[in-house]
Amino acid sequence: MKSRRWIVGVALITAATLVAASYRADDVAKVMADYVVKKDKLFENGSVKADMFEKLVNETIARMDIKTMSANDVALVNRQGIWPNAKAFPDVLARLDELSDTKDASGALALSISLELSAWLPEPPTEKRKANAQRLLNHPALNELLHSENCEAPITGLSTLTLPNEAHDRVMSLVDQFDPNRIESGSAMSSYWRIVTKLEKDPAKREPIRLKALKIIQGATATAKSKPGQEKMVSILEKMAVRMDGADAKGGLIGHKIPKMDILWASDEKLKSFEDLKGKVVILDFWATWCGPCVASFPNVKELKNHYEGYDVVIVGITSVQGNIIGLDPAVIDTKGDPKKEFGLMPEYMKKKEIDWKVVFTKQDVFNPDFGVSGIPHVAIIDPAGVVRYGGLHPGEDNAKKIKLIDGLLKEFNLKVPAN
């Protein structure tokens, strides 16, 4: 028979363990709430030095015990997108490996986050990452996870690599697992659609999936509208619905005439319409001054422009009214409600950034739904007949791929091609 002292001792240890676990979970939420306040304070005057941000990230992560984190804890931190900036990045990847072994929804969640975060590693997709993607698709709790508030995690994870054709049927079936009344379900549709379009090239076969995805977005929008403080999310979901109903999503972009775009301002005063560019290969680069990757790609764009100097190739940087200009002065220049001011500052911005290709502001948003622009920078290539031939390219990628595509169009239309 166990002594009363032994029983009491076990009870106290058990209670202490439960309290500690509960406190630790609450502590993750508290730590992240503190982080958001400090981050907002840090960025209140615009951009900050990278080392200051990394210091805040590492101080935040140091307050948590990664070895005892649950998948939900890791997900809570991941919503702020700070793991790749942390010194403890390898530690959280190791913890996710441990957590991914379970067959319940937490195991599927750990696999999902691991796929997303490992995309930040410098090497190309490893056999382990590819195997993890297959594990996630076959995971017994994936459907349950997709029906939960963490439904974005598996879709984000799967979107970080190219899935094999064998995944086609499983991916197409995932659309039926989302709760159409969840805001998170609607938010997941943008990445889900990118996965679908990579695996299914036939617009007619994609159409049932598109309509279901659109219905999910609409349901999520209705939910967001019913909740206070969700105005920003409502705007995001409404724009997503427009994209899902645009020419690209419907299969009416590649191989079709360039969608209508109204030019509000052009650095070249003679350029009034994209019809004016017929007879040339046109590279459209969708960008904005606040977009770091866009600005970082400028040297590549300039190199491409120089390569085709004197040939029937023209580059047009496409943006829309953003309400500010970033990168001209140390401080953000506010142009909200004053498009003419924003237009007027662009020549000075172009001079400072050494942009010697054409730039236009269009009436249509830079996240143009007809071109399927869900993120920038984004490049599309138009042939001399005004037909969209390629899309979804990145200006920062090696120019060799784009040169091959452009040269092919020049040859097709019997136009001069630069010597290699």
Image (tube, rainbow, N blue to C red):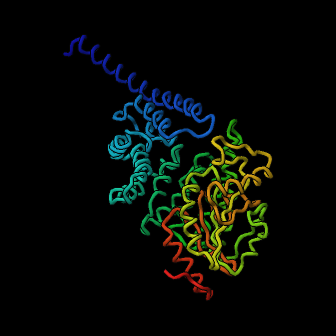
Image position, residue 189 (x, y; %): 58, 55
Front-most of residues 1 and 96: 96
**The furthest residue to the top:** 5
Above or below, 81 against 242 in this view is: above
**With 256 as the anchor, is 400 left or right in this view?**
left
Tell me the quarter of the picture where residue 4 sits. Answer: top left
Image position, residue 111 (x, y; %): 40, 49
Above or below, 398 against 367 in this view is: below
The quadrant of the image that shows the N terminus is top left
Image position, residue 364 (x, y; %): 74, 60
Front-most of residues 372 and 58: 58
Query: Can residue 394 be seen from the camera position used here?
Result: no
Front-most of residues 291 and 64: 291
How many numbered dots are placed on residues in this image?
0
**With 343 as the anchor, is 197 left or right in this view?**
left
**With 196 as the anchor, is 267 left or right in this view?**
right
**With 86 as the anchor, is 345 left or right in this view?**
right
Front-most of residues 43 and 180: 43
Image position, residue 340 (x, y; %): 80, 52
Tell me the quarter of the picture where residue 385 sits. Answer: bottom right
Query: Can residue 327 be seen from the camera position used here?
Result: yes
**The furthest residue to the bottom:** 414
Residue at position x 66%, y 44% in the image: 329
Tell me the quarter of the picture where residue 209 sits. Answer: bottom right
Residue at position x 78%, y 65% in the image: 262
Above or below, 202 against 86 in this view is: below
